[in-house]
Amino acid sequence: MKRIAILTPDPEDKDYRSRWRDVLERNAGPLRWAGLAVEGRSWADSGDLGAFDLVLPLLVWGYVRARPKWLEAVERWEGEGVRLMNPPRVLRWNSDKAYLEGLAEKGAPVVPTRLVDRVTADALAEAASDFGTDRLVAKPRVSSTAWRTIRWSPGAPLDEGPEGPAMIQPYLPSIETSGEVSLLYFAGRFSHAIRKVPQPGEFRVQPEYDGIITAYDPEPDEIAAAGAVLGAVEEDLLYARVDLVRDGGGAPALIELELIEPDLYLGYDRAEGRAFIEAVRVRLG
């Protein structure tokens, strides 16, 4: 029987001590149904992963607050010949949202993004001038679950915003109505999608902020946008989640490309994870 490890949070991270277990079971369930042995291993104390036929870092929540340790672990696993998917190279560059700039340079439709060493009033004013709007969003370059993400307009405080290298984007009001659409791909093939809409008065759509999640049938232009994003990546990906929002002109644009630890939202997949199973089987040979 083929053995798969799904990497899970650091047990010392108090923010993720329990709720990841249900997600682990949702990810492992289809694979076990397909006759594969699945085991959870903490990424921070994984032990020997060499006996596993495939290692999936799908639940390495919290790595963003220990990125140097994460990069060291990826390098060690790569040196040991661990069969990681997504590949080690992807697990490195996708951990810093500066990748958005690279994708945009390759022609992918990306929400306009300005990278800064630190968020200051001057940096925000310059971004507002460049973007033609004084309603902005600032977030850390290394972050997840909207951690230290703020919505800003002139006069708003910065104390809850990013503290180091960050990114600034125009605030897109469409997030309040059409929300954020997430398209899931396995081995380059579209599987399913969901839509996340914030609570009234909120702009963050993550479960931590009680975002409203529903199954979703993407529009043709959203499929095309996601295809352009993945085409710009030029990597061998087992899984990918493409998060899109509507820009000021109504076109879908990438807000984030999740290639490390995305929620796969398999509970919203009408095919019950079959595309996920098939992609894993292909990698197992």
Image: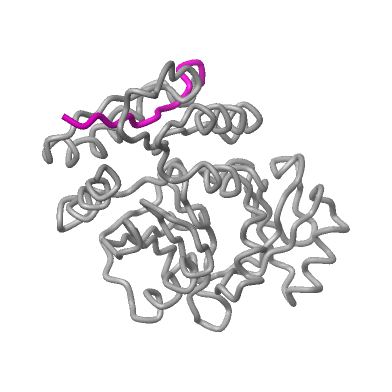
Residue segment shown in magenta:
1-13
Quadrant in which residue 221 is drawn: bottom left
Q: Residue furthest bottom?
A: 249
Left or right: residue 182 compared with residue 99:
left
Q: Is residue 256 toward the left or the right of residue 123 in the image?
A: left
Q: Give percent across and percent down for residue 207.
A: 40, 44
The quarter of the rendered structure image containing the C terminus is top left
Q: Residue at x 41, y 46 (%)?
A: 262
**Residue at 16 percent of width and 58 percent of height:** 270
Residue in the foreground of this view, choosing between 134 and 130: 130
Comparing 76 with 141, the one in front is 76
Give percent across and percent down for residue 68.
66, 30
* Residue at x-position 75% and y-position 46%: 165
Q: Residue at x 45, y 40 (%)?
A: 208
Above or below: residue 284 compared with residue 40: below
Q: x, y (%) of residue 80?
A: 49, 26
Q: In the image, is 232 to the left or to the right of 114?
A: left
- Is residue 58 a member of the stretch shown in magenta? no
Would you say 9 lies left or right of 93 here? left
- The residue nearer to you, when weighing 142 against 231, is 231
- Which of these two is toward me, 259 or 164? 259
